[in-house]
Image (spheres, helix red, strand yellow):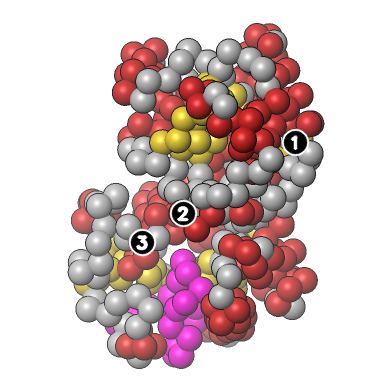
Amino acid sequence: MRYAIDGRYIQDHFPGIGRYTYNLIDALARVAPDSGFAVLHNPALRNTRYNIAALARYPNVELCQVNVLTFSWYEQFQLPISNFQLLHSPYFIKPYLLRIASVVTIFDLIPLLFPNDVPSARTRFFFRWAVWLAAKTSARVIVPSVATRDDLIARLRVPREKIAAIPLAADARFAPQSDAAIARVREKYALPARYILYVGINKPHKNLATLIDAWARVERDAMLVIAGAWDERYAGEQGSGGAAVSGRRSAVRFIHDIDDAELPALYAGAAVFVMPSLYEGFGLPPLEAMACGAPVICSHASSLPEVVGDAALMVNPCDAEEMTRAIARVLDDAALRDELRAKSLARAAQFSWERAARETLEVYRAVSSSSRA
């Protein structure tokens, strides 16, 4: 069987989707040596994160250069895919007018569930229409969690039998780190021996306001580190704890330009990682933190319980006091931290890109068989 995968989304503008696509292709090549995979890519699209050419080291991977940009009308009829069993699109804006079967990955419905993240009504309408059309014109829909599957069923009436929930995994580089690596990151960012970590953007559904409110009440000798991309449109949403925290600036550190290569050591050095989100299509940061051996406190919302299982302390994301108590408990109890670290590593080991690739391949084969019938 020969399958085409749209690798044009392996680009800097789509860091999460690019990571998913690259890791999936890499794993598919390893678990299915008897299948062929054509990776459509456009060198004109900026990509500083992943070496697409390295995928050609696998004899069953073919790199197909195309001159079609993402978000282009030309992708509806100019992609060279007629000789393949199917096309897998890792994004809902995809070729809809196809003569071969297609599979699409949809990660979440955040613009529909959290309209404050996307203030434009026109953009929200387009998102709803495009996701619906992607699901309608695809033979199967892959989602990263049961929670996202249920959202598609409830919000867009996608048939349950059409959806495959396939969990993601952390990159292999997310693993326990040496003391020296942790020390280098602490020195570079002037971090104390004990810090609480959050990794992610500051969009409203990430619920940073509640985390900052909770941290303002934690009277401990430690620092809250907020690492990741920063959108100035939401910079003022700090919650009632913002003023309290501003009185002790040394207790909070914002790192907006963290290098991906430094993330594993940043995770591994944390006294505790906190994920306060109101919603996640999957939630890679807590899984990455667990893979590095960090204790985790996690919201019990949406897909997050699927990710962390019983390996984290679960909290109500809308209850700052409960979050405060959980943070203080982990900081004060060394035995609990050790227990959570061990649970984190065991839980993270249950997720792998090889597993994701095998389950994705099952979808490909089922679609190919149906299209030939």
Q: Name which quarter of the figure residue 367 lies in.
A: bottom right
Q: Residue at x 35, y 83 (%)?
A: 72
In the image: residue 44, left or right of residue 118: left
**Residue under pointer 3:** 13
Instruction: Give the residue at x 47% y 69%.
Output: 91
**Which disc, if any, is residue 320?**
1
Q: Is residue 84 magenta?
A: yes
Asked which secondary structure carries label 2, the reply is loop
Task: Identify the image quadrant of residue 320.
Answer: top right
What's under tag 3, amino acid-wise? His
Amino acid carrying mark 2 in the image: Asp
- How packed is label 3: few (under 14 Cα within 10 Å), some, or many (20 or more)? few
- Per the model, the C-alpha gap separating discs 1 and 3 is 33 Å
Range of residues picked out in magenta: 80-102
Q: Is residue 299 above or below residue 25?
A: above
Question: Which residue type carries mark 1?
Answer: Ala
Task: Label 1: state its secondary structure.
Answer: helix
For the residues carrying marks 3 and 2, which lies nearer the camera in this image? 2
Q: Of helix, strand and loop, which mostly describes the magenta segment?
A: loop
Q: Earlier in the sequence, mark 3 or mark 2?
A: 3
Query: Which image quarter holds the N terminus?
Result: bottom left
- In the displayed structure, 157 sits above or below 62; it is below
Q: Residue at x 46, y 54 (%)?
A: 232
Q: Which residue is mark 2?
A: 231
| Most foreground residue, 275 or 11 | 275
In this rendering, would 182 be left or right of 115?
left
Horizontal placement of 146 versus 12: left or right? Answer: right
Q: Quadrant of the C terminus?
A: bottom right
Q: Is residue 193 in view? A: yes
Q: Looking at this view, is 147 or 364 the one in front?
A: 147
Marks 3 and 2, how far apart at CA: 14 Å
